[in-house]
Image (cartoon, grey):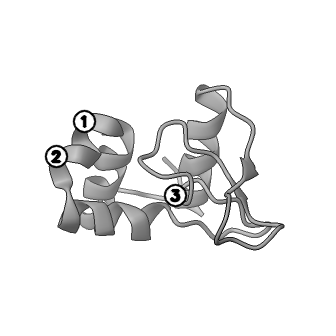
Amino acid sequence: MMAKAFAMGQVKSHGQTPEYLGSGHEAGEIGAKDGFMSSYTGKYYPHDSSEVLAMGLQALYEAPMDLYQQSPNHFAFTLAALHGMLHQGD
């Protein structure tokens, strides 16, 4: 739930409307790139699911400096999650 709230906050703060993710995705798959390295990170799910943590972990493994430079809030969120610093009331 925290990751979903983070994703929607990023999308709103950048003023972007989620849109179709493009070729290779099903017609109903929508997401937003602003604030993320990939629009898949901002993929919209109708329930409390998100790709924020999984994509953040993948980026930390594959290209941590790119994540830090291109999406500093996502970088910080991922590190906070790894350190157990996220709480439902935050």
CA gap between label 3 and label 1 equals: 16 Å
Q: Is residue 64 visible in the rendered structure shown here? A: yes
Q: Disc 2 marks which amino acid?
A: Met
- State which quadrant residue 12 falls in: top right
Left or right: 33, with 63 as reference point: right
Secondary structure type for disc 2: helix
Q: Disc 1 marks which amino acid?
A: Gln
Residue pictured at 31% horizontal, 69% vertical: 58
Residue pictured at 29% horizontal, 54% vertical: 80
**N-terminal-most mark, 2 or 3:** 3
From the top left corner, tell me how far across and down residue 39 is, in percent.
56, 52
Left or right: 83, with 6 as reference point: left
CA gap between label 1 and label 2 equals: 6 Å
CA gap between label 2 and label 3 equals: 17 Å
Q: Is residue 7 above or below residue 83?
A: above
Location of the N terminus by quadrant is bottom right
Q: Is residue 25 above or below residue 75?
A: below
**N-terminal-most mark, 3 or 1:** 3
Total number of numbered discs in the rendering? 3
From the top left corner, tell me how far across and down residue 47 is, in percent.
76, 70
Q: Is residue 11 above or below residue 37?
A: above
Q: Which mark is residue 41?
A: 3
Residue bearing the label numbered 2 = 65
Q: Which mark is residue 9?
A: none
- State which quadrant residue 26 falls in: bottom right
**Crowding near pointer 3: few (<14 within 10 Å), some, many (20+)?**
many
From the top left corner, tell me how far across and down residue 73 is, in percent.
37, 39
**Crowding near pointer 1: few (<14 within 10 Å), some, many (20+)?**
few
Residue pictured at 32% horizontal, 37% vertical: 70
Q: Which mark is residue 69?
A: 1
Secondary structure type for disc 3: loop
